[in-house]
Image: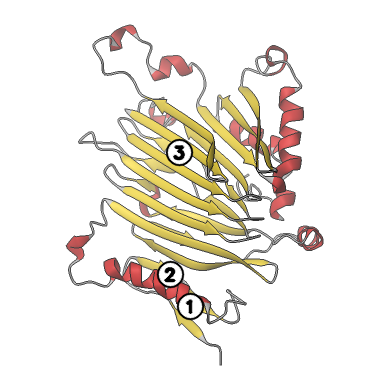
């Protein structure tokens, strides 16, 4: 009989059961002590009779943890409460990609879909996600569709806060669909990535202008996105974007966000860091920086881009990568640009992250 260890189960809560065989093959009973500690912390909020202690309509806490077990990445902890949930299918990939991963002694990526009920985040809601990738694990985060940010009524903002720890040899690929802010929406996003010495990171952070079919172009009140990467205890990347029409007395003298964006409907950033993505970062630097901006980007006004090299060293260790910024006149062109330029990501993951998006 298979021994199972149920971590948590309650209304509006999704958790995994752990067993010595099956989905989480190789998770030993000793791991249950760590998981029980997580359960104990969660139970303070999910198994009390006084639910007023936590307002689920305004604050959502989610926890994810991953481990490499016998060459395959598995989820060892997964907790989410309304309005967030996870879909975690088994890692498959093509036969050839699985063989490549086995030869390189790297685990095939485990795909995790981040899903919100209603397809978006309401004003006043705050989604907080805490993720840990243990040594040599590989995880691909996706979304089923764009994340909608609904209209703000009382000047309150929708917020999302993500903290990810990427341990040695691990790789995180965060490839969501773009954020779409409705008219008068307010959204603030903070993503913090803590890399250990040989951790690797791939992040796509992008924004659509709005519901163009309804005539909404850059009509939201506030959009703020901040991506921070630390490595060896020092901050190596701090990238922020703030889009908001000024509310000051001189607002009428300044161009609006829509006027400044011109014909562009998409703004995005790609961050590539770590030893497992060396080939990808070199390819991006070669393809994008070797060509003059005037002769490349602006001769194709449907998509413009820039790339910057990243290089850090500490105590003999070296971290390399790049950051790409791009703008496009449609989401299709933006997706095509990212897919073409980041094609080498598939070999690092053992599967194509965009094959179900086109």
Number of labels in the image equals: 3
- Tell me if residue 55 comes above or below residue 358 in the rendering: below
Residues at marks 1 and 3, CA–CA distance in whole angstroms: 37 Å
Q: Estimate how packed mark 1 is, as few (under 14), some (14 to 19) or many (20 or more) residues with alpha carbons within 10 Å.
A: some
- The C terminus - image quarter: top right
Q: Is residue 346 left or right of residue 151?
A: right
Q: Which residue is mark 2?
A: 15
Q: Which residue is mark 1?
A: 32
Q: Is residue 238 left or right of residue 161?
A: right
Residue at position x 56%, y 39% in the image: 204
Q: Estimate how packed mark 3 is, as few (under 14), some (14 to 19) or many (20 or more) residues with alpha carbons within 10 Å.
A: many
Residue at position x 48%, y 61% in the image: 64
Residue at position x 38%, y 51% in the image: 128
Residue 244 percent location from the top left of the image: 35, 24
Task: In this rendered view, identify the residue nearer to me: 31 or 265.
Answer: 31
Residue 315 percent location from the top left of the image: 66, 43
Q: For mark 1, give the secondary structure.
A: helix
- Tell me if residue 249 comes above or below residue 239 in the rendering: above
Whether residue 206 is visible to the viewer of this picture, yes or no, is: yes
Q: For mark 3, give the secondary structure.
A: strand
Q: Which mark is residue 262?
A: none
- Tell me if residue 257 comes above or below residue 182 in the rendering: above
Q: For mark 2, give the secondary structure.
A: strand
Q: Which residue is mark 3?
A: 179
Residue at position x 56%, y 33% in the image: 269
Residues at marks 1 and 2, CA–CA distance in whole angstroms: 14 Å
Q: Which residue ends up furthest to the front in the rendered image?
A: 315
């Amino acid at each position: 009989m298979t021994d199972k260890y149920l971590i948590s189960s309650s209304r509006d809560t999704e958790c995994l059961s752990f067993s010595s065989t099956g989905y989480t093959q190789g998770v030993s009973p000793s791991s249950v002590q760590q998981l029980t500690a997580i359960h104990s912390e969660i139970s303070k909020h999910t198994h009390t009779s006084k639910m007023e202690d936590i307002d689920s309509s305004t604050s959502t806490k989610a926890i994810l943890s991953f481990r490499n077990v016998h060459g395959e990445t598995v989820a060892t902890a997964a907790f989410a409460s309304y309005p967030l949930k996870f879909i975690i299918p088994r890692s498959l990939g093509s036969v050839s990609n699985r063989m490549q991963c086995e030869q390189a002694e790297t685990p095939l990526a485990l795909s995790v879909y981040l899903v919100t009920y209603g397809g978006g985040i309401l004003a006043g809601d705050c989604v907080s996600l805490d993720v840990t990738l243990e040594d040599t694990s590989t995880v691909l985060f996706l979304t089923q569709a764009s994340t909608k940010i609904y209209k703000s009524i009382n000047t309150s903002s929708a917020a999302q806060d993500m903290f990810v720890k990427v341990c040695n040899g691990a790789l995180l690929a965060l490839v969501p669909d773009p954020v779409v802010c409705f008219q008068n929406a307010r959204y603030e996003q903070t993503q913090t990535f803590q890399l250990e010495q040989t951790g690797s990171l791939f992040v796509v952070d992008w924004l659509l202008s709005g519901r163009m079919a309804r005539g909404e172009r850059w009509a939201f009140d506030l959009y703020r996105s901040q991506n921070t990467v630390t490595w060896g205890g020092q901050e190596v990347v701090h990238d922020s974007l703030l889009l908001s029409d000024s509310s000051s007395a001189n607002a009428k003298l300044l161009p609006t966000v829509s006027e400044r964006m011109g014909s562009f409907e998409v703004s995005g950033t790609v961050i590539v860091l770590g030893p497992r993505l060396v080939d990808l970062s070199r390819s991006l630097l070669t393809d994008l920086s070797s060509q003059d901006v005037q002769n490349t980007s602006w001769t194709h006004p449907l998509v413009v881009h820039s790339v910057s090299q990243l290089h850090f060293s500490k105590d003999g260790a070296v971290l390399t990568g790049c950051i790409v910024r791009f703008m496009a006149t449609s989401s299709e062109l933006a997706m095509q640009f990212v897919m073409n330029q980041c094609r080498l990501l598939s070999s690092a993951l053992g599967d194509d992250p965009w094959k179900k998006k086109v």
